[in-house]
Amino acid sequence: LSLRRQRQMCIRDRMNIMTIRCAKDNELKLINKVIPKLFKEAMMVNFDLSDASLRDMSSQLLLQGAKYYVLIEENICKGFVLIDKKTDYLEQQDYGFIYELYVFEGYRRQGVAKKLIYFVNDFFKRQHIGEVRLNVNVQNKAKLLYEKVGFQERNITCLLYTSDAADEGLG
């Protein structure tokens, strides 16, 4: 497949063309605006990071090689995904990773997220990478979508709240 074909996947939906492609500068600016909202919706916990810090986290991923892909339909950006190829050094294999997946509010529950996930799966499949991973908070409603399209729980992070060490007489 050509590099152009890898960067752009067009699917003909009945009356219009839906395109998923690498984000352009104007789309990266739009994505940058919604990064804080994305993190706040996805994290499901209170955290005290500035909007600038949240944007910096995504910028750092881009510097390390991750790429944003946007879903465009009727000349409207309806959602995006940030992905990268990573290596599991214990298993000695590469895998695809979804850092961010976001659908703009007016386009939710219309199959946009599924199309982005299928794009990511095909993208890595063409590179002979056998699995795609992501992290999701157990309380995030998107977890149901991920399970519906075939993601399976693999690792579980356990949490134990501790009391203050000084209260325990350990300080």
Image: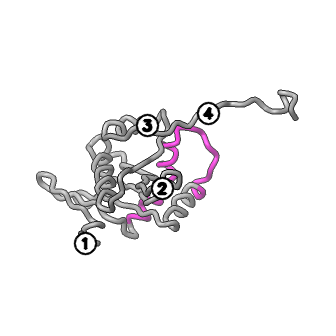
* Element class at badge 4: loop
- Residue contact at pointers 3 and 4, CB within 8 angstroms: no
Position of residue 59 relative to residue 152, above or below, is below
- In primary-sequence order, the first of circles 2 and 4 is 2
Structural distance between the alpha carbons of marks 2 and 4: 28 Å
**Observer-nearest of 1 and 10:** 1
- Disc 4 marks a residue whose amino acid type is Leu
- In primary-sequence order, the first of circles 2 and 1 is 1
Q: Residues within 10 Å of mark 3 (few under 14, many from 20)?
A: few
Position of residue 60 relative to residue 118, above or below, is below
Structural distance between the alpha carbons of marks 3 and 4: 17 Å
Q: Who's the residue at 52% across and 42% down the image? A: 43
Q: Kindly identify which residue carries mark 1.
A: 2
The image's mark for residue 92 is 2
- Disc 2 marks a residue whose amino acid type is Gln
- In primary-sequence order, the first of circles 3 and 1 is 1
Q: Residues within 10 Å of mark 4 (few under 14, many from 20)?
A: few
Q: Which residues are magenta?
A: 27-53
Please, which residue is most extreme toward the bottom here? 3
**Observer-nearest of 90 and 96:** 90
* Element class at badge 2: loop
Position of residue 75 relative to residue 165, above or below, is below
- In primary-sequence order, the first of circles 3 and 2 is 2
Q: Kindly identify which residue carries mark 3.
A: 153
